[in-house]
Each structure stands twice: as structure tokens, then as C-alpha cells.
Image (cartoon, helix red, strand yellow):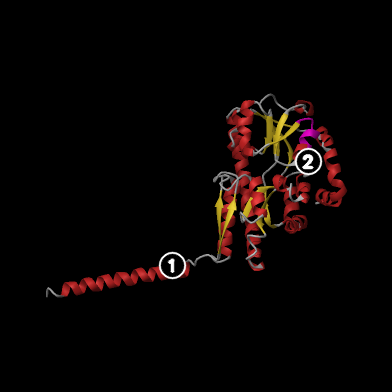
Amino acid sequence: MMMRKPLIYFVIIAFLLVVIVGCTLVNQVSEPKPEHVFRMAEAHPSDYPTTLADIEFARLVEELSEGRIKIVVYPDQALGSETSVIEQIEFGGIDITRVSLAPISEVVDVLNVLQLPYLYEDKEHMRRVLRGDIGDEILEGVEEEGFIGFGWFEAGARSFYNTEKPIKTLDDLQGMNIRVLESELMVEMANALGANGVKMPYGEVYRALQLGEIDGAENNPPSYHTSEHYKIAKYYTIDEHVRVPEIIVGSKIALDKLSEDDLAIMRQAADQAQIYQQKLWEEGEQVSLEFLIEQGVEINYIEDKSAFVEAVQPVYEKYQIKYGDLIERIREE
């Protein structure tokens, strides 16, 4: 009878090994190793609406490709600033990114048209443009500059904030040093309005406001909130001078290994993620505005924008020559 115990132990161990091996094989079948793993750069924090939408985009790509394509999102400028990331995308150092149009328009000129001041009547107008033929044509056009366009996100409307006083009329802006996005178009816009446009990386704005190197900046409510610029610049003026769309682009060099079917999957995922991002954005914008009011920020609205619109018309002249037809199509959309 004593001889049977080793046999029983052997049978139990053999059974456990079979179970372990079986589970491993099942996992290998249900969770295949991705054929392609790509890095996606994001400038915003991990809980920001666009970052959450990046993660949803990555999830959808993995789901639609049945696990063959995996995208890992790196938030909070882990892979560099937007300007730096765009340069790396061009040369294949980074695979994919979500960026504001302002910095990438320095490389892809036509993107400037989508962010001309006071171009859109409202957010629904911009959405019609981006989700229609115009948006599709421009996504295709970025390939000429070494990018692959996948889709659009939005970042609401940008408005002015400053440390000195409420901006209620165009006269109140005169002579102010205002940080703008790193784009020549944005400098031209600020200058046309009578301010001094200052190109500066986003991460340097808080310190510059503290030290008085700039009087103010311009951004959407969630960015003004999450960057904590409201702690220094207490005056926020909602004039909605520009709506700057955001774009998901990939590197033609890095993604060259993908088939047209795989690229179509990524475009489909971006299209679905866009709707998700819009919902998150609207919710986040409302939360930010309520928070800012609670923090004592003085918020005022520019109801009559006619003087502002007239002041920026010289900015259009530069782009009318080359893109006049496109500008008219956008206005008529």
C-alpha cells in the first residue's frame, strides 16, 4: 500500500502539467502575437480627451485587425513635443501621432487653410468639413509630404486669456504679448489683431506667464484648465478666433510594411474614434468651464466679432492666391 503514494503524486503532477500546457496553448491561439507593434506619440496627459481617444483608436485597430496590429500610446510628451514628434514621424523615428494642425502645417501648407481665423460658423460647420469630401481630400494630400493621414480629432475653439485685464474689445488686445501655437499663421493672426504673437512650446507657457515674459496666451478651456494657466492668467475671453482641428498621421517610412487593407483598417478605426473623441471633448469642455468659474476666473464673451473678423482679413490674402477655391468650398459647406 505504501508504494501507491508516489504513483498518485506522479499522476497529479502529470495532470497539472497537462492543464498548464493546455492553457498555454489556448492562450496562444486566442491571443496571437501581433505582427506589427507601433508607437503612437501624444502630447497631452493620460486622462485628457484626445489621449483617451488615442487609446480607443489603438483598441479598435487591434480589434479590427484581429490582433495583428498593436498600437502603444505614449502620452504626456513621453516621445517629445509635437514639433519634435512631427520631425521624427517624417524620418520614421516614430510611427504614429495625434497632433494639432498648427505645428504640422509648417510642413504641410494646405493644413493652414483649415485653421484660418473665424473661418467656421460653429463646431458643426467644422465637423461637416472634416467628415466630408474636403477632409478626405486633405488626408490623402498629406502623403505628398511623407505622412499617412488616418483621421481627425477636434480641440474645440481657441480663445484668449491673460494676466492683466478682461479683453472685451479689439482695443484691449493692442500691444499684448500673446503666446500662440508654433505656427507662422498663428503669429500673423495675433499680429493682425494688434497683439504681438509669440511662438513658444506649450510646456514653457506657465513659466513665461509667471515671469511676465508674456502677458497671455490662447487655448481651449480644457487645456487652459489642465495646464493650470488659470492660476496665473485669471482673465479668459471667449472669442473663438480659431478652431484648430487635430490630425492622426503615420510615417510613410515606418508604416511601409502595412498592406492597403491594413491601412484601411486604421482609417476605419480613426473614423470611429473621432466620434468617441467628440463626445469626450464636449463633456470635458463643460466640466472645465464649470471648474474655471468655481476658481474665480473672469470669463467674458465677445458677442459682436465683426471688428475682430475685419482685422484678420489681411491674413486671408496670403492664402487666397493658392487656396481661394478651397476656402470658398469650406465656407459653403
Q: CA distance from mark 1 to mark 2?
A: 54 Å
The quadrant holding residue 223 is top right
| Circle count | 2
Which of the numbered marks, if any, corresponds to residue 41?
none
Residue 191 shown in magenta: yes
Residue 233 shown in magenta: no
Q: Is residue 220 placed above or below 250 in the rendered structure?
A: above
Q: Position of residue 74 (x, y in %)?
A: 55, 50
**Residue at coordinates 81% horizontally, 34% vertically from top-left?**
192
**Residue at coordinates 66% horizontally, 48% vertically from top-left?**
99
- Badge 2 marks a residue whose secondary structure is loop
Quickly name the residue at label 2: 118
The quadrant holding residue 315 is top right
Query: Callout 2: few (<14), some (14-19), or many (20+) C-alpha neighbours within 10 Å?
Result: some
Whether residue 290 is visible here, answered yes or no, is yes
Quickly name the residue at label 1: 27
92 or 64, nearer to the observer: 92
Q: Position of residue 125 (x, y in %)?
A: 75, 48
